Image: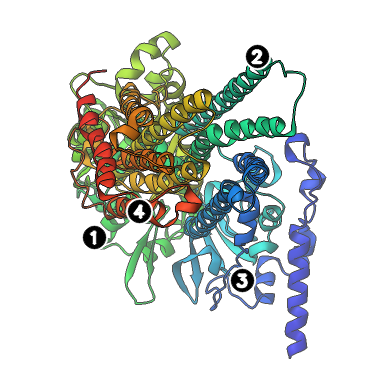
Amino acid sequence: MPWIFQEKLRIAVLVSKAAFQFISSVSPSDYTVPPEVKAAGHDVKKLRFHGGVNGIAQKLCTSTNDGLPKVNKFAESESKSFWVFVWEALHDMTLMILAVCAFVSLIVGIATEGWPKGAHDGLGIVASIMLVVFVTATSDYRQSLQFKDLDKEKKKISIQVTRNGFRQKMSIYELLPGDIVHLAIGDQVPADGLFVSGFSVLIDESSLTGESEPVMVGVETPFLLSGTKVQDGSCKMLITTVGMRTQWGKLMATLSEGGDDETPLQVKLNGVATIIGKIGLFFAVITFAVLVQGLVVRKWKDGSHVDWSAEEAMEMLEYFAIAVTIVTLSLAFAMKKMMNDKALVRHLAACETMGSATTICIGNPSKFANMKSELHDSALKLLLQSIFNNTGGEVVMSKEGKREILGTPTEAAILEFGLSLGGDFQAEREAVKLVKLEPFNSTKKRMGAVVELPVEGGRLRAHSKGASEIVLASCEKVINSKGEVVALDDSSLKFLQATIDQFASEALRTLCLAYKEVQGIVGIKDPVRPGVKESVAVCHAAGIAVRMVTGDNINTAKAIARECGILTSDGVAIEGPVFREKSQAELLELIPKIQVMARSSPLDKHTLVKHLRTTFDDVVAVTGDGTNDAPALHEADIGLAMGIAGTEVAKESADVIILDDNFSTIVTVAKWGRSVYINIQKFVQFQLTVNVVALVVNFSSACMTGSAPLTAVQLLWVNMIMDTLGALALATEPPNNALMKRPPVGRKGHFITNVMWRNILGQSFYQFLIIWKLQASGKSMFELEGSDSDLVLNTIIFNSFVFCQVFNEISSREMESINVFKGMLNNYVFVMVLVATVAFQIIIIEFLGTFANTTHLTSHQWGACVLIGFIGMPIAAILKLVPV
């Protein structure tokens, strides 16, 4: 017996391989796939030889009715190791520049001061480089692990499967060869397999073949490939190959994920970092030129400009070290930190873009609702046959024996209504033979089914269901209240139209059900989830325009929009057909006023989003749940797909998946996005203040005296530790409701605002003034005498400079508000950073004097340093009163 099973398995594998072996030698974009190549491996004769689909199912030891009794998991790819991230971090250009600085500093220091004293600065830079490398690698490694987890969540696609005789939802990772999978419009084919049964199935194979034309799949061409998408129709499929052995798996094994477009904030940060790099290079060159010019002028006056000694050559090298190491060091780290922030924001790109959003285009807000809609009882019992046969949903029994309704909220509502009338889904389906089913799509706005009636001699009946005005326009007769078929005269038509309008005015979506004669009109109430109206109000207060784009009747759309606060007295509600007839000049005037677009097609939604982005420079967010929303989701700056009701095609086109389908979650995303943006602004303001002061002080001092008060090791402490801790402190400020009361930044807004420039320049001026005063008069102010007076003064200057940054960090918590202490104690990270910074500073001054070029300070001197730093806070408060 075992050899029989092995032989069956071998045959099954050979058939599977023959069925799905494609020729893949060139890029689809550069090559039109000939019919004979596309058909390669689709050997229908061999399939028939093995008994067709049922024969393959039998050889796989499965049933097309009951499926398999087992589970399966995909093997996971290995993550990059920590040392790979270390190696990548070493390739950073900024670190290479610092390595050159360290090399020069070591040579000059050892040559002039000997070992080991002369090596302190150089070794300090080397240690800093290693610290940066390991901190960067650790951060990137942790991010890679986090994003691997997020990627797992993203790929948790569920599919309808029949297994052990029960219809159930399961992850695509649990599929096995032999499983029976149910596919509908918008689903992604989860594995390679064969068509079992279904209607009007069109498959988009562009992701595999590059061909834009959809492929019809049926009994004659039953091959379904993983990674492709169901464009139309519905079917059952038999899984034959899963995981990396599928055609999609083989393709993915040869590809790597491409980069993303930069978001508005990334572009702005990149520009700031580039400018900082250029400023650093400029000042380094100027510093070197000034120092060399001083030496040359001195030698010219001495008459020794022709003769150069080894000591003078060493002095030139020391000037180069001062220029590159001292001046460039601070800005090099600023540039590095900017790039790190840009990389961080790149991973948070969708959230950050949402923070800049000026417009949100949503569908029917009732989609942000409970997934089971309520059906009003205004339909007739004669609809049962139509309800249970002309549907994309199903009524099934769960493992627990409970009745479950599968399908879209609309389908589920209608099926629930049919059941509430005493209908029996299985009995109605078995009473007729389903000949053909045309699924609903957004272009036709209706669906249809043809059934054969055995009890009436095999007569065929066509059922139709869809948008009321479209189906009604195709009808000539109507069933009256007595169940009689009568002509659809003007009075009946007016009555039906009045019913539609009445339902629409009550925020009911209307569907018309017909089979030659009108069976009736049903009104579906999608109860709007509590909080939607409040969330829309928050968006309006935040300067974010909310526009409703839906396929519903215009009266229904207007009623729902008014209920949610979207449609205001000065807003415009328009229908898609009217919108698409407008000229470009008319659209320019109309689009800013549009708040509701009803009966819209996917192209209308895409056109609106494109105009908002390109013509009006809006940062546009779009919500969607259906396959038809994919073009608009892709066109938008940020696409938001519904996690519960959304199709896989919509989710794939989106940047963010709203797991609970709740509109208030979108507002939360916007709030966090604004928080990301403003927190980075706070840090950049703090960072630039530190570096402007350090640059000006060291540049001016180096040019005038040939030395700098802040040494390389001290600057490394300020830039490495304080800025790293400063970024941690300011970036962890949680969002608050005040963020949603200010206008959005938009696409054209300046990253460094006038408010930031005011704070940066004002604070920098104070710090530069006080440090310059200490340099000029510090010895007399503190009564410093003796051989170590210069070292003590430089330590006081360094200590005062650090405490200026500590208190400036507190002031940077708010860029415009004077009350910077509000909520500070609730942000324990910020408080811990402040405590750690002060603790490290005490250690550096009191215990690391030899390494950091510092010395012990008295309590009086410590108090003076803290006071100098503290004075910066009232100055920052006064600056915030200056209008800009």
Circle 1: residue type = Ser
The residue where tag 3 is placed is 178
- Mark sitting earlier along the chain (3/4): 3
**Furthest residue in direction bottom, as rendered:** 1
Q: Is residue 278 left or right of residue 852?
A: right
Secondary structure beneath label 3? loop
Residue 842: x %, y % from top left: 35, 53
The label nearer to you, 2 versus 1, is 2
Write the residue at 77% across / 53% down.
22
Which residue is tagged 1? Answer: 420
- The secondary structure type at the circle numbered 4 is helix
Q: Nearer the viewer, mark 2 or mark 4?
A: 2
Report the Cα–Cα distance between label 2 and label 4.
47 Å
Relative to the observer, which residue lies in front, 638 or 199?
Answer: 638
Looking at the image, the residue that sits furthest to the front is 786
Give the CA separation, mark 3 to mark 2: 95 Å
